[in-house]
Image: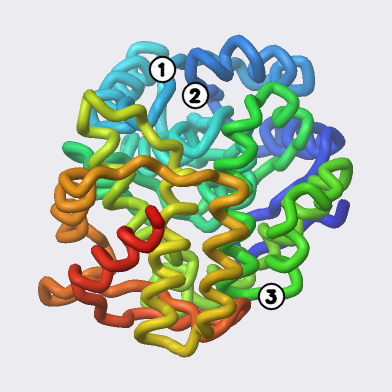
Amino acid sequence: MENIKTEHYDILFGQEAYGQLGTYLNNNGYSKLFILTDSNCYEHCLPYFLSNLPTEVPFEIIEVEPGEENKVLDTCAGVIQTMLELGGDRKSILITVGGGVITDMGGFIASVFMRGIDFINIPTTLLAMVDASVGGKTGVDLNGIKNCIGVFAMPKMLIIDVNYLETLEARQIKAGYAEMLKHGLIFDANYYNYLKDIANVDFGDLQALIHHSVVIKNTVVTQDPKEQGLRKILNFGHTVGHAVESYFLTNESKQTLLHGEAVALGMVVEAFISKELAQLSEQDYLNIKHAIQSIYGVVDLSEDDILNSLEWLKFDKKNYSGNIRCVLLNKIGESVYDIEVSKELIISGLNLYLN
């Protein structure tokens, strides 16, 4: 599989990439290597990673609790305190080994520790491979508000090794698959049309599909690294998705939604809004709704759930002057951004999502 060179770092594919990682670590004079992971990855992924880590740099493993609920400043402070106690300095490097929570949080920790140290991402979930670990976004949540605190910071290297996916449950694979569907919907109709019939997808060639998604994301990010314009299209499904995800995350009576599951819901609703405000056809909207719901089912939402979820829309980072702004589709494979949307239209979309 061909590696991808970005402006700031290389994205390496396959088990052979660890040789390049070892060479990089040994040749750059790092004083200490910190490996950040969560308790799930510590058990299922870290032994494989360590068996492939050829380096003379001394390392320490820092383990945190898994889950979006732990992607908060308190966790970051604990990790930073541990790094200090273990002798971390400005010539240290941090490697994240985990899913999107770990890559988001680890990149943030590295970017603020002593005003910034180098970091490398080793994503272990499909979602992190195709989305979270690519593009330099780092961040943590605040009181349930997704990625409210964070910076843009590029890793020194990213390794995508599909062997980690063997440790995942089907639900986690499907969560990452939602972001791949999104890439097709916003940028590549042929890619979406292949992915939407999941029963016919050749998962034996999953690395090639991941590579295609990463190429799409990197193409967008390269043109707009700080999300001032075009990069916003990568947020399709995320305005509504993040609102519902945050509500579920902060409501103890609700089973937490995985990020990809929330985005899948959001894409159905925002496809409806695209039909109303952009140029998406009725046929394409119904196509998207059927395809996504056939894979993900329908999240059970009461009227109160909908109203409570809407309260989280005011925290969306795409808002401007208090107005909600969405990414919409003109057609499958073509998207537009910064379209002002009313709460009433979102409610209509959510009600149609349920029926």
Is 166 positioned to the left or the right of 202 in the image? left
Q: Which mark is residue 64?
A: 1
Indicate left or right for 54 with 2 as reference: left
Mark closest to the chain's N terminus, 1 or 2? 2
Q: Which residue in the protein does label 2 denote?
A: 36
Q: Amino acid at mark 1?
A: Val
Measure the C-alpha gap from mark 1 to mark 2: 8 Å
Q: Amino acid at mark 3?
A: Ala
Amino acid type of the residue tagged 2 in the rendering: Leu
Relative to 274, is 254 on the left or the right?
left
Q: Earlier in the sequence, mark 3 or mark 2?
A: 2
Provide the secondary structure element on which disc 3 rests.
helix
Between the residue at mark 1 and the residue at mark 3, the CA separation in whole angstroms equals: 39 Å
Front: mark 3 or 2: 3
Q: Mark 3 highlights which residue?
A: 189
Disc 1 and disc 2 in contact, CB within 8 angstroms: yes
